[in-house]
Image: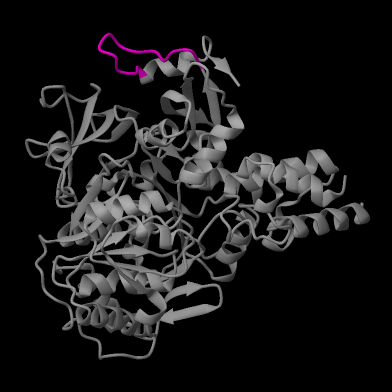
């Protein structure tokens, strides 16, 4: 499964409590749309570390890397390429 | 003593008009600019017909516009009703109706149209049209409508239940006295710069904002703690002298940032309120930042914000204490009959002083329960030691403290009961290492009805902001009840053994 699809499933299931994909666009800002708060972001990071085997450093925790499905997917790919 | 927060702010404007009052991202607003923004809001409200005592609701994110609107309403003689911008239309409508707000000042908000449609008659004013940041009138508070220090200045809603929303009503004197006491013990000056991550509409965030503006200091608005590393960078870059958080704020900073090794050379003080922080976490922060004064504080919305603070020099010798009463305030521990208990004996924590609220808005019954015989009954239990240091041991009230938020269980239950198939529902706070408490709900389903956890959570998500959505749902056959039929909340913690966890 593509990284995007896995992420979308995770967010839909755990924060929007639905399977309906129309609730979440890959470019939706988690912050602006109120999808995830400060504890949610910790759970997302745990998911990334377990599911994709990437390590999220403190300095990686910026909206440029984590604030949408597309951004996270790009971040995960960069991390894997660098590993 | 000055009559209102507007008078306190006017002194800061006079002292250093060109100094930075507010910073947010790339925006920097001087005291003179802030004053002009306030004047514009006040003038516009009065042109629209706002009379002294009229309620003006704000539905605004933490921003310079929020600050201009808040002081603008006070300057026009109105009563500020600052609403949680994360709230859903259902809650917003409840507060607008209950406060009988004449105006709602807001920007773009996804729930706005629905909230306004739900039967409230208030007039909507767009913040963008209300505010100007041009240099306005000279530095004088003459435009302020004098309403008197005893008049209501603000209503802070602590719950959004349909039946009984609780609106803590604060006078101008409440706000001025509490702000002045905090400025004094934190020794705030015009050279201070605080990074502000707390919600403005709660009493703690409200206090951080007004105390720093009263001191002529700079408030750097960060809005949220979703990216803790960014907050720390901001503190370094802005040469912050101060920072305020709840226990969860510090737990996050400790776990996800390099609090000790960073270049926080300007930092002078940290404050902590909003629930008990573990002595271990306090010790970790102090070990990482030994040059910084750490203020443990205690209070509640009904007392404007602050009731006690821990002088930092006693932190080591009085572990676990929330300190001594703030200026002009008296704290006592009383028994069930209202008689004072001797040092060391646990009872009801009560307080009196200039910060104690006028009462709950339009709710004399609820007011009578907490304002009795000259005392504010906080709902907290604890004791005073022989030196007058207060120790909080528990709460007799049911309010759930999760992160920086206070949530009434009734509000969650009301939403759960509105879902088809739910016969009974109860919600309570469960201990959580990061957030203090998380919300858990127990449900009894009607015979023949089918519901799963996902459906319940999706329903909650539609009617409640994210932080009020339960983290755990348990389906059970019956709830523990007393002989009179009341749910025994205290029994819920042990109830899981019998209940079926989903």
Residue drawn at (21%, 25%) of the image: B343
| Position in image of residue B259 (x %, y %) | 61, 52
Residue B4 forms part of the magenta stretch: no
Left or right: B182 in relation to B433: left
Position of residue B436 measured from the top left corner of the image (x, y, whole percent) = 48, 35
Question: Predominant secondary structure in magenta?
Answer: loop
**Whether residue B404 is situated above or below residue B70 in the rendered picture:** above
- The C terminus of chain B - image quarter: top right
Q: Is residue A23 above or below residue B490?
A: below
Q: Quadrant of the N terminus of chain B?
A: bottom left
Q: Nearer the viewer, residue B390 or B400?
A: B400
Observer able to see residue A83:
yes
Near-viewer residue (B284 or B32): B32
Q: Position of residue B21 (x, y in %)?
A: 40, 76
Query: Hey, which quadrant is residue B332 in on the image?
Result: top left
Residue B342 relative to residue B203: left or right: left
Q: How many marks?
A: 0
Extreme-front residue of the structure: B448
For image coordinates 47% across by 13% down, the residue present is B494
Q: Which residues are magenta?
A: B476-488
Note whether B196 is above or below B136 in the view shown: above
Inspect this view and state whether residue B8 appears: no
On whether residue B483 falls in the magenta region, the answer is yes
Residue B79: x %, y % from top left = 21, 64
Q: Residue at x 72, y 63 (%)?
A: A64
* Residue nearest the observer in this picture, B43 or B123: B123
- B156 left or right of B331? right
Q: How is colour applied across the structure in the image?
A: one colour
Which residue is located at x 68 percent, y 46 percent?
Answer: A20
């Amino acid at each position: 499964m593509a990284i995007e699809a896995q992420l979308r499933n995770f967010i839909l299931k755990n924060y929007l409590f639905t399977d309906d994909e129309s609730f979440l666009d890959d470019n939706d800002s988690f912050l602006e749309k109120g999808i995830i708060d400060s504890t949610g972001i910790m759970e997302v990071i745990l998911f990334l570390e377990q599911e994709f085997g990437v390590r999220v450093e403190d300095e990686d925790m910026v909206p440029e890397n984590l604030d949408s499905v597309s951004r996270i997917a790009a971040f995960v790919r960069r991390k894997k390429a660098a590993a | 003593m000055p009559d209102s927060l507007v008078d306190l702010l006017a002194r800061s404007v006079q002292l250093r008009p060109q100094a930075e009052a507010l910073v947010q991202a790339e925006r920097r607003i001087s005291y003179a600019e802030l004053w002009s923004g306030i004047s514009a809001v006040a003038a516009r409200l009065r042109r629209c017909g706002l009379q002294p005592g009229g309620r003006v609701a704000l539905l605004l994110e933490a921003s310079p516009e929020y600050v201009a609107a808040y002081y603008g309403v006070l300057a026009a003689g109105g009563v500020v009703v600052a609403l949680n911008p994360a709230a859903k239309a259902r809650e917003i409508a409840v507060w607008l109706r209950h406060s009988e707000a004449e105006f709602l000042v807001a920007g773009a908000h996804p729930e706005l149209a629905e909230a306004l449609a739900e039967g409230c008659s208030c007039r909507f004013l767009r913040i963008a049209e209300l505010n100007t940041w041009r240099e306005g009138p000279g530095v004088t508070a003459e435009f302020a409508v004098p309403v008197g220090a005893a008049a209501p200045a603000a209503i802070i809603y602590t719950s959004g239940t349909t039946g009984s929303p609780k609106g803590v009503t604060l006078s101008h004197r409440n706000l001025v006295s509490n702000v002045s006491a905090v400025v004094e013990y934190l020794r705030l000056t015009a050279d201070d710069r605080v990074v502000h991550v707390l919600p403005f509409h709660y009493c703690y965030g409200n206090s951080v904002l007004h105390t720093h503006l009263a001191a002529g200091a700079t408030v750097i608005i960060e809005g949220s703690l979703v990216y803790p590393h960014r907050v720390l960078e901001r503190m370094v870059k802005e040469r912050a002298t101060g920072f305020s958080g709840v226990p969860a704020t510090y737990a996050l900073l400790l776990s996800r940032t390099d609090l000790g090794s960073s270049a926080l050379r300007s930092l002078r003080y940290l404050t902590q309120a909003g629930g008990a922080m573990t002595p271990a976490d306090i010790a970790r922060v102090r070990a990482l930042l030994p040059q910084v004064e750490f203020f443990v504080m205690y209070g509640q919305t009904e007392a404007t914000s602050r009731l006690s603070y821990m002088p930092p020099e006693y932190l080591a010798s009085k572990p676990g204490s929330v300190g001594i009463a703030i200026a002009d305030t008296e704290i006592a521990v009383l028994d069930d009959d209202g008689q004072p208990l001797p040092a060391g004996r646990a009872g009801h924590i009560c307080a009196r002083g200039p910060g104690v609220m006028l009462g709950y808005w339009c709710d004399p019954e609820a007011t009578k329960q907490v304002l009795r015989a000259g005392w504010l009954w906080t709902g907290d239990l604890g004791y005073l030691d022989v030196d007058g240091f207060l120790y909080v041991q528990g709460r007799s009230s049911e309010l759930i403290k999760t992160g920086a938020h206070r949530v009434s269980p009734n509000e969650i239950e009301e939403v759960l009961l509105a879902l088809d198939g739910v016969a009974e529902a109860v919600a309570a706070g469960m201990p959580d290492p990061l957030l203090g408490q998380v919300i858990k709900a127990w449900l009894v389903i009607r015979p023949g009805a089918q519901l799963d956890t996902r459906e319940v959570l999706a329903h909650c998500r539609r009617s409640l902001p994210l932080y009020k959505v339960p983290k755990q749902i348990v389906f059970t056959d019956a709830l523990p009840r007393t002989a009179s039929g009341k749910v025994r909340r205290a029994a819920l913690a042990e109830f899981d053994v019998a209940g079926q966890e989903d």
